[in-house]
């Protein structure tokens, strides 16, 4: 049950990162699309971790999915998309560092325990 809670929280926080970044830009991103991106990114990371992949691959695999979905949903030019993705990473970091500290899990991959 704890893993399910952590997984759901990771999806919500990741989706919020995409939503807030889109909101800060003039073009914006609907919340349901941000949640789809969050679900895809977190699920890919969790599945990569579950099959026993090395750490570098677990970190690398979700990035292209998030980037591609953001590009498709945003429907903006490449410079606007790159700005949106950079802002998403900044918001993600700002949200997830304290959340990971308080909840004692790496919020992109809920199974990772902080040492």
Image: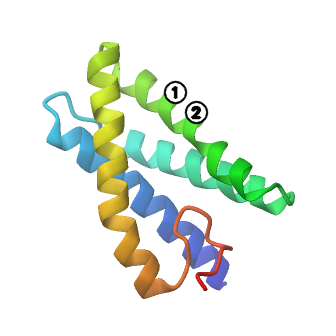
Report the colour scheme: rainbow
Q: Residues within 10 Å of mark 2 (few under 14, many from 20)?
A: few
Q: Residues within 10 Å of mark 1 (few under 14, many from 20)?
A: few
Q: Position of residue 51 (x, y in %)?
A: 86, 57
* Residue pictured at 79% horizontal, 56% vertical: 54
Q: Quadrant of the C terminus?
A: bottom right
Q: Kindly identify which numbered label has been placed on residue 68.
A: 1
Q: Secondary structure at mark 1?
A: helix
- Mark 1 touching mark 2, by CB under 8 A? yes
Q: Quadrant of the N terminus?
A: bottom right
- What's the distance in space between the residues labelled 1 and 2, CA to CA? 6 Å
Tell how many labels.
2
Eyeballing the image, is 112 above or below 28? below
Q: Is residue 75 in view?
A: yes
Along the viewing direction, whichever of 49 and 32 lies nearer the viewer: 49
Q: Position of residue 12 (x, y in %)?
A: 43, 62
Q: Position of residue 5 (x, y in %)?
A: 56, 77
Residue that badge 2 annotates: 64
* Residue pictured at 29% horizontal, 54% vertical: 91
Q: Position of residue 64 (x, y in %)?
A: 58, 33
Eyeballing the image, is 1 above or below 70? below
In the picture as drawn, the residue positioned furthest to the top comes out as 77
* Residue pictured at 46% horizontal, 76% vertical: 100
Along the viewing direction, whichever of 69 and 113 lies nearer the viewer: 113
Q: Secondary structure at mark 2?
A: helix
Residue 49 appears left or right of 4:
right
Residue 80 appears left or right of 34:
left
Residue 36 appears left or right of 61:
left
Eyeballing the image, is 88 above or below 3? above
């Amino acid at each position: 049950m704890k893993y399910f809670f952590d997984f759901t929280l990771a999806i919500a926080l990741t989706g919020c990162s995409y939503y807030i970044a889109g909101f800060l830009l003039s073009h914006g991103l609907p919340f349901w699309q941000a949640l789809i991106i969050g679900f895809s990114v977190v699920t890919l990371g969790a599945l990569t971790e579950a099959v026993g992949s090395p750490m570098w691959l677990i970190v690398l695999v979700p990035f292209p999915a998030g980037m591609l979905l953001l590009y498709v949903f945003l429907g903006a030019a490449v410079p606007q998309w790159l700005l949106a993705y950079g802002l998403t990473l900044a918001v993600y970091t700002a949200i997830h560092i304290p959340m990971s500290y308080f909840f004692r899990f790496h919020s992109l991959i809920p199974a990772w325990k902080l040492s």
